Amino acid sequence: MISIVVPVHNEDRSVELLYDELASALDPLERPWEAVYVDDGSTDGSFAALTRLNSRAANVRVVRLRRNFGKAAALSAGFRHARGEVVVTIDADLQDDPAEIPRLLAKLDEGFDLVSGWKTQRRDRLSRRLVSRVFNAVVGRASGLKLHDMNCGLKAYRAQVVRSLRIYGELHRFLPVLAHDRGFRVAELPVNHRPREHGRSRYGVERYARGFLDFLTVSFMGRYRHRPLHLFGGLGLVFALIGSVVLVYLTVVKLSGSAIGHRPLLTLGVLLVVVGFQFFSLGLLSELITSHHEERMGDVDELHVDEILEPRRETVAR
C-alpha cells in the first residue's frame, strides 16, 4: 500500500482538487493507496472540505489536530496513522505535482530508502529562491548530504524510515539529513513545481534563521548523540589548554619580578581553565546518561539493521 500524507493548514480550496490529481496519478499503478490528510489547526473551511472528501472517498483518512502545531507535528501525526509500506508526503497547496509520484516510487524501487524531490524550476519569488539556494548549500556542505532542495514537500519514504525518525519543532526541513545520519540511502529526483493558485505562502525569510538553529540541533544529534564527550570534552580540553598556556606565561612573568595581579590576562587564563573543566565534566555526565540509555535499549538497535540473510536449509543440512 502507498500512503500519501498531506499536511493541511487553511487550504480549503485545494484539498479536493489535490485528491482528484492524486487519483489520476495513482489509480493507473493498480496498487492500493490511501490519502492521510492532517488538518493542522485550520481556521477556514478546510476541515469541512476534508469531511466532505472523507464521506465520498473510501481511501481518505482525516486527522485533525487540536490547534496549529506546525508542519513537523502534522507530518509526525500523519506518519503514525499511515498504514502503507511506502509513504509519500506532498503539500496541499497544489504547487507540488502529484503526477511526479510514480517517478519517485520507481526511484525508490531502485534500492533507495528516501527519494526527495528537487524543484529545478521553482515558481517562487527571487528572494526566496536565493536564500533557499544558500541555505541548501550550507546544509549540504556541513552535513555531507549534498541535495539541491532539502525542504521540498514532495518526498517518498519506505515505512521503516518514517517509523525510525522522531521529528518535532521544525526539524521537518532536515528529514533527508536525519535519515542519512541513520544510514538510510537517500536520492534526489527533479520534479515539476507549479505556481501557487490558491491560498498564500506562510513562510518568510525569517524561517531560514530558525532553520540554521535547527540545523545545529540536527548536526549535534547526528554526529555526537552517541559520543557527547567528543564534543564537550574536546571543547573543554581546548579551553583548558589555552588557559594553562596563559597561566604558565604569567607565572614566568611573575618569577621575573613583574606584577601580574592587575593584568586582565590573569582573569582570562583562570576563566578558560574553569570553563574547560566545566565542559569536560559536562561531557562525562553526558556519556554516563548515553551509556545508561544504550544499556536499556540493548546491544543492537533494530532500527539500524537493514536486512538479515538467513542460511539456506540445504546448506545447514550439509
Image (cartoon, grey):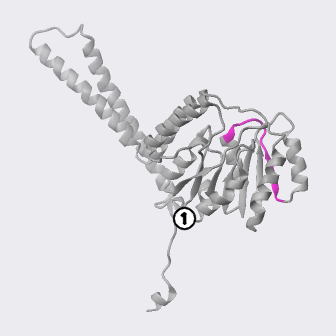
Pointer 1 local density, CA inside 10 Å: few below 14, some 14–19, many at least 20: few
Q: Name the residue: 48% across, 39% down.
A: 137
Asked where in the image residue 255 lies, by quadrant, the reply is top left
Residue 90 image position (x, y, % from top left)? 70, 48
Residue 312 image position (x, y, % from top left)? 50, 84
Q: Decide: is 226 above or below 263.
A: below
Check disc 1 and report its element: helix, strand or loop.
loop
Judged from this view, the residue extending furthest toward the front is 121
Residue 178 image position (x, y, % from top left)? 53, 48
Judged from this view, the residue extending furthest toward the left is 256
- Comparing 215 with 22, the one in front is 22
User: Is residue 236 in the magenta section?
Assistant: no
Q: Decide: is 133 above or below 307.
A: above
Instruction: Say whether residue 279 is visible.
Output: yes
Instruction: Say whether residue 83 is visible.
Output: no
Q: Quadrant of the N terminus?
A: bottom right
Q: Is residue 143 left or right of residue 33?
A: left
Say how many tags the image has.
Answer: 1
The type of residue carrying mark 1 is Gly
- Comparing 47 with 264, the one in front is 47
Q: Quadrant of the C terminus?
A: bottom left
- Comparing 226 with 219, the one in front is 219
Q: In this view, does 245 lie to the left or right of 271?
A: left
Asked where in the image residue 240 lies, by quadrant, the reply is top left
Identify the residue position indicated by label 1 in the image.
Answer: 111
Judged from this view, the residue extending furthest toward the bottom is 318
Which stretch appears magenta?
A: 59-71
